[in-house]
Image (cartoon, coloured by chain):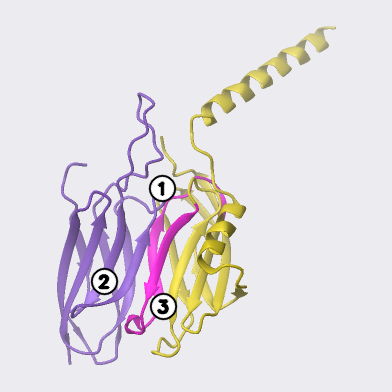
Chain colours: A purple, B yellow
Amino acid sequence: MSNKPTPRVRVPANAKKDEIIEIKTLISHEMESGQRRAADGKTIPRKIINTFTAAFNGKVFFEATWHPSVSANPYQSMFFRASESGEFAFSWKDDDGSVYESKAKLTVA
Amino acid sequence: MAQRAAQTRRETLIAGMASFAAAAIAPSLAFADAAAVEAEIKKLYGDKKAEAGRIKLDVPQIAENGLVVPINVEVESPMTAADHVKSVHVFADGNPLPGIVSYKFTPESGRAAASARMRLAQTQNIICIAEMADGKLFTAKSEVKVTIGGCGG
């Protein structure tokens, strides 16, 4: 897949104070496990997204370490306790060093 | 006599099939086993004992497609600064590598729950271990029967 991985995040725009909201994320990535072999018998090198982090106003509240057994186009959901208005920053770190990012705003009433 | 000849032919066939199967499996890498998962857990927590309970590990009993198997883990906890879930590690004992995902939670998470999708090469156990803020460990295990393995070559 030569396309640049595109992250997609679903997060509510508004929340009440102390409400626990669910965040769903998805990113297009083939998550090549490093276990497969090409037709010529050579192992296809591993290339996965190894770390996902979710931060709010600069503070990381959830982190996931992914191993090669995470499916292609990895989906990840998590929860967050809304405390104040601010901005989410989600980031996905690739084995090749690239970082894919996505941001979302949250207003707490 | 005729019957005996048939038997030998059948034996030859079976032997042939067995060697074919062996040849087909041989190029793939070795699989992890329960001992490998235990070794991973030992690497993380040493000889500390884990109790059963508090974890709700939600995986299908039967997965038709091993490439995309949903997994949802939830650990019971009030998620306050003093009492929250610090981390959850998920392992599988029949994949080429034992690790699947590891989560780090904080009190801001609100709920120690997360879901993802994983690849499973064959029917195997999913083992999950959670560490609390006070250092206590909890564990849960569930078997998933895989119809088509997700270790596609």
Mark 3 or mark 1, whichever is nearer to me: 3
User: The residue tagged with tag 1: helix, strand or loop?
Assistant: loop
Name the mark on residue B112. Answer: 3
Q: Which residue is found at the position 16% from the left and 45% from the top? A: A3
Estimate how packed mark 3 is, as few (under 14), some (14 to 19) or many (20 or more) residues with alpha carbons within 10 Å.
many
The residue under the point 39% across, 26% down is A41
Which amino acid type corresponds to the residue marked 3 in the rendered image? Ala
Q: CA distance from mark 2 to mark 3?
A: 14 Å
User: Quick check: is B105 in the magenta stretch?
Assistant: yes
Q: CA distance from mark 3 to mark 1?
A: 25 Å
Judging from the image, mark 2 belongs to the subunit labelled: A
Q: Which residues are magenta?
A: B98-125
Q: Which residue is mark 1?
A: B67
The local crowd at label 1, few if under 14, some if 14 to 19, many if 20 or more residues have their Cα within 10 Å, is many
Q: Earlier in the sequence, mark 3 or mark 1?
A: 1
How many numbered circles are shown?
A: 3
Quarter of the image with the C terminus of chain A is bottom left
Name the chain letter of the residue that bears numbered label 3.
Answer: B
Rendered image quadrant of residue A79: bottom left
Mark 2 lies on residue:
A54
Q: Locate residue B105 relative to residue B43 in the image: left or right.
A: left
- Are the residues under marks 2 and 1 on the same chain? no
> Where is residue B21 drawn, in percent x and y?
58, 27
Do marks 3 and 1 share a subunit? yes
